[in-house]
Image (cartoon, rainbow, N blue to C red):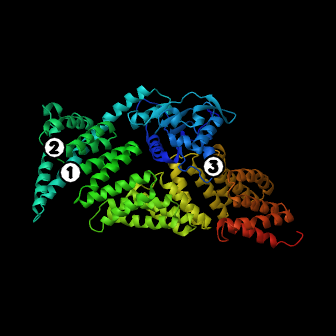
Amino acid sequence: MTPDSPRRFAAFISYSHADRRTARWLHRAIESYRPPRGVSAEPLTPVFLDREELASSNDLAESVRSALQQSAALIVVCSPAAVRSRWVNEEIRFFKTQRPGAPILTLIAQGGSAADSFPPALRFEVESGLITDHPAPEPLAADLRRGADGRRDALLKIVAALLGVGLDGLRRREQRRRIRRLAVVSGCALAGCLVLAALAVTALIARNEAERQRQLAERKSLTAQRTADFMISLFKVSDPDEARGNSITAREILDRGAQQIDHSLRDEPQVRADLSTTLGEVYTGLGLYDPAQALLIKAAAAPGQDAAGRLRAALADVDLQYQRGDDDAADAAIAKAAAIGATSPGLDPLLQAQLLVARGEVAAIRDRNDESRRDFQAALALGRRIDLGELRPRALEGMALNEYYANDLPAAARAFEVALRARTDYSGDSHPKISDSLTNLGSIAYRQGDSVRAEQYWLRSLALDQRMLGADHPKLTATMNNIGRVRLEARRFAAAVSMLGQARAIQLRNKVNRDDGMIFTASSLGLAYLGEGNYRAAEPLLQEALAAAVANDHRLHGPVLTDLADLECRTGRARQGYARLAAARAITANRYPDEPWRVALVDNVAAGCLAALGRMPEARALAGRSTPQVLAHWKPATLYGHDALEREQRLEAQPPGS
């Protein structure tokens, strides 16, 4: 593939396992980015993200090589860990070899100089597939390090390069778009602060409390009233008649509040600190990290704060650094918050639980899984005494993901079941996290060989997504494909045709053309029709899937060739089908070196074709060699196991010498 060839991926993100959180953020940010009005460009989707570092492999996986060859650009997340990563260096070397002249962009996550954070294949030229000692031109670099670009500007640098437009022009258009959007959320900023006021006022209704609690309630009530008065004042203008009907953006309101806090609340440090924390949280939610940081520094430095106020400000800083993608700063912030909690006896247990969950999440992104698990468990232990609210399902979901990524499938299944019940109890049965947990449970069951249970989970996930997203949403097709496939493998052909037909109809209505999901749906639906004996319906689907697989250099190329050859040999075109299997065998062996049953399946289909050609001794010998290999992977009642066994038995039933 050359730089001018049609591309399948807008970009390929190469990263070290230690930088996976930054890579995930970049992947979501690019795929969700929509160019502002006036910028004519294709959407930047899909973007390939390979989460694993292939630690168990001796070479780049075939899917990774294929994606690199079909990517319009390479984005490297640079850091000292990337320099140490064999796979990041290998992906850069392979991309330079296969896609000479294609753009290579970098996102510096950590490190000092280029030598600290740029892998060798990035710093030096690659010739004939080998890294030379000739320095390469330094690629465009976006910089996430403290004091550099920040997330917003770093993303714009990457996006501008991918779109092929000027950075300054894109920034100006983005600024105009952000101003329009901020007007919409101005009411949300006020609502968030008024919620704080309402919570504080609620404390005033406590009866028969000790004197300390009564004084605390009075102080909270005063703080809430002053907070409400302050926020209302931000919306007042000198001439209401002049302002009526005009837009006031949330950014303008926030900036006005940040400027007035010190002046209006000079004599009320507690209120000033609480408001600084609240406005800092709002700025963080809007992605305005620098002003958020300034406000949270003020909140932390305000005199006269109680432990709860200081801890709340510290946890807001943890969230800021987490959203910013600065894992080191998030680690430092959670350590500071933990120190406040450790030296503050009598702290509100709910605030303690919030600290533990935040610490567990930060530990998880730093790969400290044992520490993460302990923090989640400690937070849940507090739930025996208090109502944790949303913190309980959040902690349980975090623990389940820990087990899943540790590849402990039985423990992960148990943990997801517990998290699923907790999320349903707290959020009802229509929360997106429920669908996520059901999908994960289905994947675990399928990997454990329990297709019946996998289908049950996926059916529940599908019903929930249909209720939340509507019956025609493209996201549904992935789950429908999973369900259709397990039905096909169980030889429930009519049920598979029904589900896969629905998925295909959604794809056609949404103009899905030649992507991974479409190839999967067309090939599986064709195979289901083949199983029913409906060859007229099966053949055009398999031909369509084959054309798309060839055009996209897709991993299903060999399997679809095999299925099409099987159909031809069943319908009087055995010579044509048998000839097709030679190519199918070579492609399958190359694509699936670690799955010998796939090549055995090609041979087994070839045995059927040889029988149709009257070459019975060859057919019997080939079936005798291939059938045991297929049955070693598939049970006799499954699709491939049944077909292989049936071919061998049919051949054995032929008279000797025939």
Q: Position of residue 529 (x, y in %)?
A: 64, 61
The local crowd at label 2, few if under 14, some if 14 to 19, many if 20 or more residues have their Cα within 10 Å, is: some
Answer with left or right where residue 591 lies relative to residue 376: right
Look at label 2 and name its amino acid. Pro
Position of residue 210 relative to residue 321, above or below, is below
Which residue in the structure is indicated by mark 3? 61
Q: Secondary structure at mark 2?
A: helix
Which residue in the structure is indicated by mark 2? 269
Q: Residue at horizontal 73%, vertical 65%?
A: 629
Q: Residue at horizontal 53%, vertical 45%?
A: 16
Which residue in the structure is indicated by mark 1? 196
- Residue 1 visible to an observer of this rendering: no
The local crowd at label 1, few if under 14, some if 14 to 19, many if 20 or more residues have their Cα within 10 Å, is: some
Q: Nearer the viewer, residue 318 or 80?
A: 80
Q: Nearer the viewer, residue 346 or 96?
A: 346
Q: Position of residue 267 (x, y in %)?
A: 11, 41
Answer with left or right where residue 280 lies relative to residue 372: left
Q: Secondary structure at mark 3?
A: loop
Quadrant occupied by the C terminus: bottom right
The local crowd at label 3, few if under 14, some if 14 to 19, many if 20 or more residues have their Cα within 10 Å, is: few
Q: Earlier in the sequence, mark 3 or mark 2?
A: 3
